[in-house]
Amino acid sequence: MGTTQFLDTKMGRRLAYHLTAATGATDVPTVVFLGGLKSDMEGTKAVHLEAWAKARGIGFLRFDYSGHGESSGRFEEGCIGDWHQDTLAAVQALTNSPILPVGSSMGGWQALLLARALPERVVGMVTIAAAPDFTEDGYWANFTEDQKAELELRGQVELPSDYMEPYVITKHMIEDGRVHLVLRDPLVLAMPVRCLQGTADTAVSTETALRLLDHATCSDMRLELVKDADHRFSDATCLRLIETAVAEVLGLSGAAKIG
């Protein structure tokens, strides 16, 4: 998939990325893949969607947030606001066309923040198990009193994960998350939005997906619930659904499948 390149940002971070230039119609938006918490740009969904876009001459950008993958920094030092800054830096430095963010889990929150920050650039959106406001509604709301005391005393707690080593959640991440909440104030999405959610997802609930659908102001927003799909959303069926959603938002007729 090519050699990893690096972007040095004004915030002093070094972001790893892969950028595929468009070779087809110049008016088709660049697809920007936004990964989840502790995920990286080499994940199944990102790499698969990159190949799908390349086969159609569509520009595609995937990158690692700071503290993730090949980028600089430590995960434990980062927060939602830092990764939002990384997203803005990558998009503004590496693309100059309209963009279509595809946000997975925490990347769904990042896609919503991106649309709020650059409404003139974001012309469509696809989310996969979007997790907006999870630091407050997922972590903080479910912390025990002992965990809250540990967070105050030590500045961090460890939470188990179904998919990898435990997450280290810092007091800084919780407090910064409150500055970037998107489900408390009006959320206007003036572009087509497609949301995908598995019913067997143990990390993000269908209730979260329904809450986002109900909260957002959007004239063209749809939620597709996929029975028995889990948080990875990466089997062959789920990957085809992602292709279909992106193709629909891009307005590509009959372009959902490779080959």
Image (tube, grey):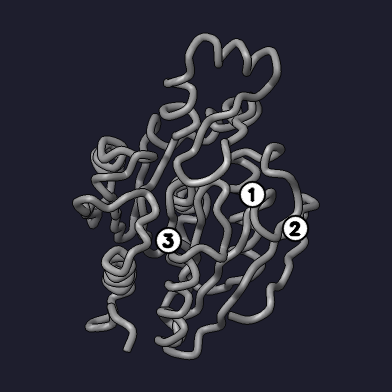
Residue 98 % position (x, y): 47, 70
* Callouts 2 and 3 close, C-beta under 8 Å: no
Q: CA distance from mark 2 to mark 3?
A: 22 Å
Against 223, residue 27 (above or below) is: below
Label 1 or label 3, whichever comes before in sequence order: 1
Give the residue at x 68% y 21%.
155
Q: Which residue: 48% across, 75% down?
A: 50
Identified by mark 1, the residue type is Gln
Q: Which labelled disc corresponds to residue 33? A: none
Q: Amino acid at mark 2?
A: Thr
Q: State the residue position of label 1.
A: 85
Whether label 1 touches label 2, CB < 8 Å: yes
How far apart in space, not on screen, are marks 1 and 3 (Cα)?
A: 17 Å
Which quadrant of the rendered structure holds the N terminus?
A: bottom right
Depth check: 3 or 146 in front? 146
- Is the C terminus in the top left, top right, bottom left or bottom right quadrant? bottom left
Say which amino acid is labelled 3: Val
In x, y percent, where is residue 39?
55, 53
According to the picture, the residue beneath numbered tag 3 turns out to be 102
**In the displayed structure image, the side of residue 154 where residue 57 appears, left or right:** left
The image shows residue 213 at horizontal and vertical percentages of 26, 43
Q: Which residue is mark 2?
A: 9
Taking depth in this image into account, of 128 and 226 the one nearest to the observer is: 226
Q: Residues within 10 Å of mark 1 (few under 14, many from 20)?
A: some
Asked whether disc 1 touches disc 3, contact meaning CB atoms under 8 Å apart, the reply is no
Q: Is residue 212 left or right of residue 13?
A: left
Depth order, front residue of 48/246 = 48
Q: Is 191 on the left-hand or right-hand side of 27?
A: left
